[in-house]
Amino acid sequence: MGKITVSMYLSLDGIMEEPGVWHFPYWDDEMANFQRDVSYANDALLLGRVTYEGFAAAWPKMKDEGADRMNALPKYVATTTLEEPQWNASFIKNNIIEEVTKLKRETDQRYLIYGSGQLIRTLMGHNLIDDYHFMVHPVVLGKGKRLFLEQDQRGLKLVGAKTTTKGVAILSYQPSE
């Protein structure tokens, strides 16, 4: 059976929006190594439309060590508006819950979600996420899109924790039974 992993940058107050604005002062080799390990532990990306469009515009132009991996990974994109898949993508245009359940049931692949807060909340509400990796940055933003909303209440079990030298807490969770 397939597995779904979430990897997300968060502020201390739970904001996920526009990490490019606040995340880079905390980027270091420890985070790069963690992100590389997460990327190589997965077989495909599962993305929402907004994240896909941003990634598809940026990654093909990049030349850093992770670009080849990001560009090569198959991408499954939840969208009702996009028409022409590009950047090694397949679109999930119908019932996202049915389609993702089918992906998990019919393959042994590991699917990685970056960003895509709405997709995460939707899949989490149907118990389809197996692992969460949160990189909690030592910054309070005060406003912006939060990953979790009031209706998203649920328990998670901590399965790993590490702090980088720049103060980012890398927390790994699984759904609690």
Image (cartoon, rainbow, N blue to C red):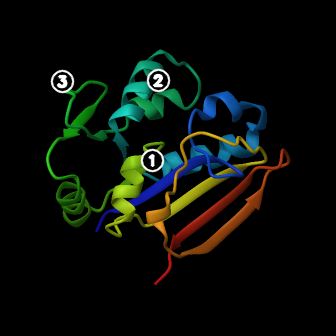
Q: Residue at x 84, y 44 (%)?
A: 166
Q: Position of residue 138 (x, y in %)?
A: 79, 47
Position of 49 compared to 40: left or right? left
Element assignment for label 1 = helix
**Which comes sooner in the sequence, label 2 or label 1?**
2
Position of 125 compared to 61: left or right? left
Position of 23 compared to 138: left or right? left
Q: Which residue is mark 3?
A: 84
Q: Which residue is mark 1?
A: 117
Q: Residue at x 46, y 84 (%)?
A: 177
10 Å neighbourhood of mark 3: few (<14), some, or many (≥20)?
A: few
Q: Residue at x 55, y 32 (%)?
A: 66
State whether residue 83 is above or below residue 171.
above
Q: Position of residue 70 (x, y in %)?
A: 45, 33
| Front tag of 3 and 2 | 3
Q: Tag 1: residue type?
A: Gly
Which mark is on residue 22? Answer: none
**Which comes sooner in the sequence, label 3 or label 2?**
2
Q: Position of residue 52 (x, y in %)?
A: 37, 32
Q: Position of residue 134 (x, y in %)?
A: 61, 55
State whether residue 68 is above or below residue 130.
above
- Alpha-carbon span between mark 1 and mark 3: 23 Å
Q: Tag 3: residue type?
A: Glu
| Front tag of 2 and 1 | 1
Q: Tag 2: residue type?
A: Trp
- Alpha-carbon span between mark 3 and mark 2: 18 Å
State whether residue 163 is above or below residue 161.
above
State whether residue 146 is above or below residue 171.
above
Residue closest to the eye, 61 or 174: 174
Which mark is on residue 59? Answer: 2
Image quadrant where one finds the N terminus: bottom left
Element assignment for label 3 = loop
